[in-house]
Image (tube, rainbow, N blue to C red):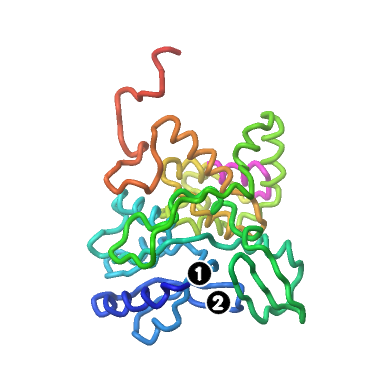
Amino acid sequence: MKYQQELKDSIRKALPGLDVVIAWSAGYDPLHATPHFIRREEDIDRLEIGPFSVHNLATYLPGLRGKKVGIVVKGCDSRSVIELLQENLINREDVTIFGFPCTGVVDQTKIRKALGHTGKVDFCQIASQTVVIGAGGEEHKLRLSKVLADKCFSCQYPNALISDHFVGEKISPSAQTEGGDDLEAFENMPLPERFAFWQKEMDRCIRCYACRNACPMCVCRDHCLAESRDPHWLSQEDSVRDKWMFQLIHAYHLAGRCTECGECQRACPMDIPLLLLKKKMNKEIKELFQYEAGVDPEATPPLLSFKMEEENIKEREW
């Protein structure tokens, strides 16, 4: 990106006062990026940002509490940082935030489906709205809009909402419609079809808990119900019931907290559309409490507050 050097310069100035800066660098092939932990000045040169900077780096912040940490964030990542601050899971004075505008990130699942088995990837270039991939001795050209993550088509927060250092020029929220509204299509399904849909999807779950581990708001991993034996919430049976039970509890624990970063779905090795479940929950939270997670640093998440009567819950009328 054109402001990558500006970002490197900002980190270089701030690094002496920090224990580590979390960013991205090139991964094992040109199609992938990987989290990059900058501790020395020479580490800065390996930093790369762009459409492959997918990982939500806020996931690492609770584990580094007490250290002076810098973090590079795009819009959806910054919402997770705000939510962590709201819940006092990190200390604002310990975190230096480097923000930038995001024009979208790629979905590796879409690339795999478009190319099939690619073998070794030799190069990848993004020019204008085209992704050019060299693999298997062939050159493949894909429209960028065809391989962007679905969450990017409806993103209303492309710029970091909180930052100490912001590089680049802020951009407008996405007005793209390509990719469709999966939540609207899901809600239009009859209830029996919705249930059958999730039964089919959950049957493919292998209970690896990658969705939980990648989630920046899933911070109680040492006491997770998935491993708890007292109380014993879940069995080790390979049943749809237990898989669905875990995912439902996970979604409820994220109610009013999920920032729709999509890390749960990205991390899932079975490509289960887990973000759809979280988006449905967020829609209900917004309608009931007029609240969006990770948007206002001064707001209190609705399920962390108490009111005698909620404005949109008419209990006395039932």
Tell me the crowding category of disc 1: few under 14, some 14 to 19, or many 20 or more residues within 10 angstroms, Cα based.
some
| Tag shown at residue 183 | none
State how far apart marks 2 and 1 are (Cα).
Answer: 13 Å
Using the rendered view, name the quadrant where residue 137 is placed: bottom right
Using the rendered view, name the quadrant where residue 31 is placed: bottom right
> Which residue sits at x=54%, y=62%?
105
Q: Nearer the viewer, mark 2 or mark 1?
A: 1
Q: Nearer the viewer, residue 168 or 259?
A: 168
The residue tagged 1 is 50
Question: Magenta part mainly helix, strand or loop?
Answer: helix
Q: Position of residue 226 (x, y in %)?
A: 53, 51
> Which residue sits at x=73%, y=61%?
113
Q: Is residue 247 magenta?
A: yes
| Tag shown at residue 27 | 2
> Which residue sits at x=39%, y=71%?
22
Q: Identify the residue at the far top of this view.
A: 317
Q: Identify the residue at the far bottom of this view.
A: 42
Q: Position of residue 162 (x, y in %)?
A: 32, 57
Q: Image check: 186 left or right of 82?
A: right
Indicate which disc, 2 or 1, sits on the residue closer to the N terminus.
Answer: 2
